[in-house]
Image: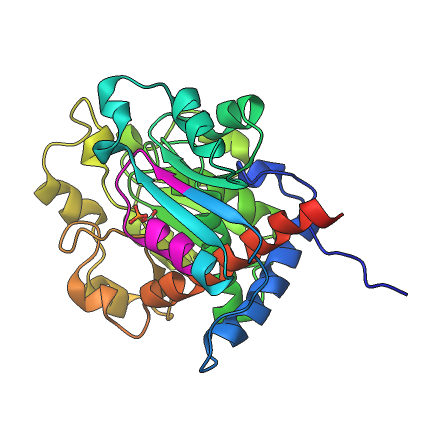
């Protein structure tokens, strides 16, 4: 009997909210296989050699853009890269016109980062291609949450029952919302911690604990996911100064060593060293920041591979 084609329950990856628990488990199982491939001398498989993918980035990115591009190359896809800053968007071309022009060159899949929440959903309703959300404003960053949860599973063997504190600028963070949704689906407990101005009102309705005292959050958690202060999304002052923020919510080695247990430190990047986290913490044995980046390639290979399988169903 022919083996069943493994794929996701959704045509696009727009947000964690659209994934079932089985989808997430399947992504992790597939990423495990691709991680083995990435550790072989020949790191390439022919799985997507008939697929063309456009990476369109309307916002800056280092990790996500490079990681998607590497994942696509490892899967033998053809790729085109588009950065809004050097395109005809600056001459007034709309998002749909831009993407339709790219699609008329026979592109199958679009990986998009955009500053507006919902941009991926909008695009998925108007163009005939599979859309992967690489971050839409302060809304969702699904592949970041998947690689974060995968890294926690790798560290502890399972995510269920683990206590994760998401600390910092939760208000402006797409990583926070996607992490909350993903970790809950996998059975973890989640706390958010930061000054009240940077914690969204009503966030408790998502089933998270809220804490404003950093030491209490650190003493509660197994994993501290430290978020960057997103000054570029802040139109008003949410705290008196970066120095004061750092004194109240910055994680340093002295604090880490004062805890009576060894917690794991994560950060989605980019890091503002000396603000939310000091260098001796970021580079310590307790930090899995670079493991997160490494796992990002395997997770993105898994997502692209499973979405592409939809075509063969
Ligand atoms: N974590 C993350 O999204 O980083 P980039 O903005 O560099 O892609």
Quick one: quadrant of the N terminus?
Answer: bottom right
Colouring scheme, one of rainbow, by chain, secondary structure, one colour: rainbow
Residue appearing at x 44%, y 64% in the figure: 295
The foreground one among 22 and 96 is 96
From this viewpoint, is residue 179 visible? no
Give residue 7's position: percent from left, percent from top: 69, 51
Q: Residue furthest right?
A: 1
Q: Residue furthest bottom?
A: 41
Tell me: residue 140, above or below residue 190: above
Count every numbered label the image shows and give the total.
0
Q: Give yes or no for residue 68 being in the magenta stretch.
A: yes
Tell me: residue 141, above or below residue 267: above
Q: Residue 212: name its quadrant.
A: top left
Residue appearing at x 42%, y 28% in the figure: 101
- Residue 6 as seen in the image, left or right of residue 97: right
Residue appearing at x 35%, y 44% in the figure: 81
Give residue 100's position: percent from left, percent from top: 46, 26
Residue appearing at x 80%, y 58% in the figure: 4
From this viewpoint, is residue 270 visible? yes
Tell me: residue 35, above or below residue 219: below
- Residue 52 as seen in the image, left or right of residue 89: right
Tell me: residue 200, above or below residue 78: above
The foreground one among 284 and 262 is 284
Give residue 78's position: percent from left, percent from top: 46, 53
Q: Give yes or no for residue 14 being in the magenta stretch.
A: no
Give residue 119's position: percent from left, percent from top: 44, 26
Q: Which residues are magenta?
A: 55-70
């Amino acid at each position: 009997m022919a083996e069943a084609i493994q794929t996701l329950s959704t045509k696009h990856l727009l947000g964690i909210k659209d994934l079932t628990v089985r989808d997430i488990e399947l992504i992790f199982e597939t990423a495990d296989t691709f991680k083995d491939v990435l550790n072989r001398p020949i790191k390439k498989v022919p799985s997507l050699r008939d697929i063309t993918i456009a990476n369109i980035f309307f916002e800056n990115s280092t990790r996500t853009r490079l990681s998607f591009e590497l994942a696509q190359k490892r899967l033998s896809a053809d790729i085109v890269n588009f950065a809004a800053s050097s395109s005809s968007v600056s001459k007034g071309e709309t998002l749909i016109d831009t993407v339709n022009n790219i699609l008329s060159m026979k592109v199958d899949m679009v990986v998009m980062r955009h500053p507006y929440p919902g941009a991926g959903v909008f695009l998925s309703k108007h163009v005939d291609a599979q859309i992967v959300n690489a971050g839409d404003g302060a809304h969702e960053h699904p592949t970041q949450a998947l690689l974060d949860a995968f890294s926690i599973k790798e560290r502890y063997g399972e995510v269920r029952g683990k206590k994760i504190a998401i600390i910092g600028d939760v208000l402006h963070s797409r990583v926070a919302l996607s992490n909350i949704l993903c970790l809950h689906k996998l059975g973890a407990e989640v706390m958010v911690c930061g000054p009240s101005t940077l914690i969204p009102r009503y966030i408790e309705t998502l089933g998270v604990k809220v804490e404003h005292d950093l030491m209490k959050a650190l003493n509660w958690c197994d994993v501290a996911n430290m978020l960057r202060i997103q000054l570029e999304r802040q139109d008003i002052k949410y705290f008196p100064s970066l120095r004061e923020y750092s004194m109240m919510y910055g994680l340093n080695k002295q604090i880490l060593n004062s805890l009576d247990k060894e917690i794991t430190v994560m950060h989605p990047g980019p890091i503002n060293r000396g603000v939310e986290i000091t260098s001796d913490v970021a580079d310590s044995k307790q930090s899995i920041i670079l493991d997160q980046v490494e796992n990002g390639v395997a997770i993105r290979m898994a997502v692209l591979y499973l979405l592409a399988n939809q075509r063969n169903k």
